[in-house]
Image: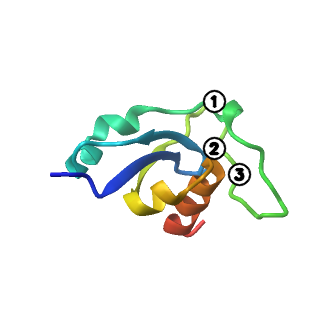
Amino acid sequence: MASEFIGAIVGAVSGTVYAVINPDEDAELDNPRLLLLQAHPETLPPYDEEKDEQPPPIPGEREPMAMVRIPRGDYMAALTMQDVADIIARLTQR
């Protein structure tokens, strides 16, 4: 069975896209090992007061990851990674 979704591993706090997963089947996106990737806060963007974005985690801790399922058609229509980030923001209401 073909996959209807593309998976994106994003920082749960920052929304930064760390990985994109093109699965053979949608069930592959349920694998919890995909969320073991963690980012160190120094690699996260700084707090943006104009956008009122949530600041990164406390220094020394690692940011938790989240899986966002992007409909394949929306992903294929994206021309840049910024387009992908915008789709993720819309799906997660950031």
Of 83 and 69, which appears nearest the observer?
A: 83
Q: Which residue has dot 3 on it?
A: 55
Give amino acid for label 3.
Pro
Q: Which residue has dot 1 on it?
A: 60
Of the image marks 3 and 1, the number of the one nearer the N terminus: 3
Q: Which of the 4 image quarters holds residue 90?
A: bottom right
Name the quarter where the C terminus is drawn: bottom right
The percent position of residue 31, horizontal first and vertical second, equals 26, 41
Q: Mark 3, residues whose alpha carbon is within 10 Å: few (<14), some, or many (≥20)? A: some
The secondary element bearing badge 2 is classed as loop
The percent position of residue 15, horizontal first and vertical second, equals 59, 52
Question: Does residue 75 appear left or right of residue 39 in this picture?
Answer: left
Question: Residue at the spot x=20%, y=49% of the render?
Answer: 27
Q: Which residue has dot 2 on it?
A: 57
> Relative to 1, does residue 93 appear above or below in the rendering?
below
The alpha-carbon separation of the residues under discs 1 and 2 comes to 8 Å
Of 61 and 22, which appears nearest the observer?
A: 22
Residue 57 is at least partly visible in this image = yes
The secondary element bearing badge 3 is classed as loop
> Contact, CB < 8 Å: mark 3 with mark 1?
no
Question: Residue at the spot x=31%, y=34% of the render?
Answer: 33
